[in-house]
Amino acid sequence: MLLARFLGPRVWILIAALLLAAVLVPMANLYLSPSHPLHVPSYMVPLLGKYVCYALLALALDLVWGYVGILSLGHGAFFALGGYAMGMYLMRQIGARGVYGNPELPDFMVFLNWKELPWYWYGFDQFWFAAIMVMLVPGLLGFVFGYFAFRSRVTGVYLSIITQAMTYALLLAFFRNDMGFGGNNGLTDFKDILGFPIQADSTRAGLFAASCIALAIAVLIVGWITRSKLGKLMVAVRDAESRTRFIGWRPEYVKLFAFTVSAVMAGIAGALYVPQVGIINPGEFAPVNSIEIVVWAAVGGRGTLLGPVIGALLVNYGKTYFTAVAPEFWLFFLGGLFVFVTLLLPRGIIGTIDYGWETWRSRRRASREEKGESDDGEGQPLASPAE
Amino acid sequence: MAEADVTNRKPQDEVQALFEPQGVREEQTPRTDAEGHGERRPAAAPASPESAPPQAEAALAPIEEPVVSPHPYATKLREQRLAKEASGHARRDTLLYLDGVNKSFDGFKAINKLSLVVARGEMRAIIGPNGAGKTTMMDIITGKTRPDSGEVFFNGDVDLTHHDEAAIASMGIGRKFQKPTVFESHTVEDNIRLSLAGPRSVLEALFHRKDQAERDRIDAILETTRLTEKRKLLAASLSHGQKQWLEIGMLLAQDPELLLVDEPVAGMTDAETEETARLLREIARTRSVVVVEHDMSFVRELGVKVTCLHEGSVLAEGPLDQVSADPKVIEVYLGR
């Protein structure tokens, strides 16, 4: 089939699995009795939803790191900005049900003695407006940041450092109460989303399904971009940037495109994450978070569609497991994992499987050729002065 | 993304040069009128014989043009432009024109009052000892390095010092590096496809559809470079010599008027060297080629005019036998 050839069967299996999960997990949570062996407990649904959001974030990073070679250590910033945009909508939905009962101002503003809503909170009582901002704010930041960075030909470790500085600067800014985003505590105490109570099992099931569908769509979009001529150009920029310049391309715009798309995707991941965990605070901007994203993508295998998704799911499942079993060892484990992957699996899980498969196939082809079934042409001398 | 287009935009005259038919371009002077609306008209007489006297058909004729505005500023601009065009006449039949180019790095004069003229359709070999400024010269022509002073013109009157690498590449100057640089994780075919002349905007690349014309051009280039059978292989799996040919093929795909080729036979076997000479001669039938090379037997095989560089300026120029007999050249090559 044309579609199967377009992305390869594995990616379609992933998409099918995501869509299946979007249906089955909510059903197993809502309709099976708690005693049933396949029942998914209610605490598990938002947890899984959180993993799926992380997978989307890792995929966003993979688009710039795996395919264009931009090691961004600041993708947590785009994630958090998307999260804040969604958090602002959720804050406005609280209305008069807050502790102070002010129908207009969120609790923290009443607490800080603010008299009226700051201008940048206007419009966030509308879901459509918040939804646009979820994409626009991270996208715009990515675009402006990328424009200046790539135009000045900042590459490699220097670029990584300034992305890290960007997220750190935002961390400090969002800590300030004057910013009007709840300072240290961030935004929390959400009541409902689109009229549905945010704590209800059915709403959480819906959010989980939405996350899975968003990830499936993102896999399709990234697949489409990376399989296009532009995708080939991205890899070309990653491998030999100056060559692309000398054949007339402008690598800075290729990078800018990927960076902006990636920032928007990270923002969407953040927006889906916030209602499921129930809080967004400046901690999400912490540089360590951005580095963790890199670990997910590296573990799964950068430059593949499957890798970052698998990596994010595995590492975060490991995090949940280890922080429950031996909380004091989690960070050692994470650090050890990164060292292990860098030293022994530089291609990541999926990349190593692919590489092993390719090597095995070419070895089989070579051995078949030795037996005399060679496909013609391969061994012909090219330097023959013909005609 | 649209901004890719915006910065690709060049002054009108160079854009017109780009739109001219492929292959060897005709000699003409693309010009803009005083308001800059980019109306194109031939400078030499053929299109308007009644307005120009018969002797004006020579390319060096003064340009007749109505004074558009009596405003002193516009008049001044027009005079400046006419003066510039008049000086451009001398360069009109040259493809590449370097005059008095200087470039120094931290006090070291890499290029020192270098002057060089390459005519249309010419193949030129550049020789010279290490540090003679060959690669810096290539960098200056392709926009990687900006000269401290001097003139660098392409195609008559396109000032190359005002453009960056991508713009210069789109104008029709292709460059092959000393070390073969191909896109290793792509197939041979995709390497050529990415280099094919055509729009260079990000959005076009995203929505690009492969068509028959594109396939035909790729086939033709693979045929010329003898890589047809390797088309589905990854470029990383090619031998050194094949990578060099692939890179030359990528240059051809760009459909440039001028190819700059830096040491194409370094590290090649004798058979490969011979094949490369054949390939370059074939290319030189339709395009101008500048080859930088150390290998004298290869230069002899090319059989073209030779320029010898030394300490950033031209030491000798002429047929290889004459240049290699020049006592100055002998001293530079052997005397140290």
Image (tube, coloured by chain):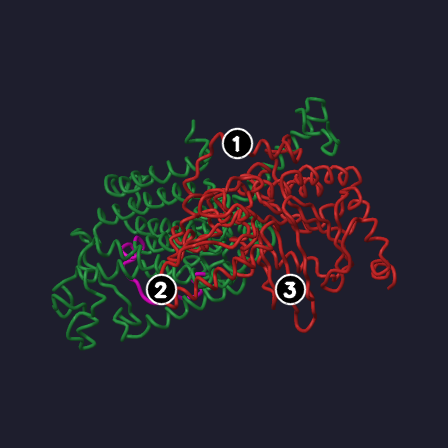
Chain colours: A green, B red
Q: Is residue B239 above or below residue B91?
A: above
Crowding at label 3, few (<14), some or many (≥20) Cα neighbours within 10 Å? many
Residue located farthest toward the bottom when viewing the structure as drawn:
A113
Chain of residue at mark 2? B
Q: Give the quarter of the figure containing the C terminus of chain B.
A: bottom right
Residue B24 image-quadrant placement:
top right
Crowding at label 1, few (<14), some or many (≥20) Cα neighbours within 10 Å? few
Instruction: Give residue A212's position: percent from left, percent from top.
Output: 33, 44
Helix or strand or loop: what does disc 1 sit on? helix
Q: Give the residue type at disc 3.
A: Val
Q: Give the residue type at disc 1.
A: Arg
- What is the C-alpha distance between the residues marked 1 and 3? 42 Å
Chain of residue at mark 1? B
Seen at 56% across and 61% down, the residue is: B161
Q: Answer whether labels 1 and 3 touch (C-beta < 8 Å).
A: no
User: What span is in magenta?
Assistant: A272-290
Q: Earlier in the sequence, mark 1 or mark 3?
A: 3
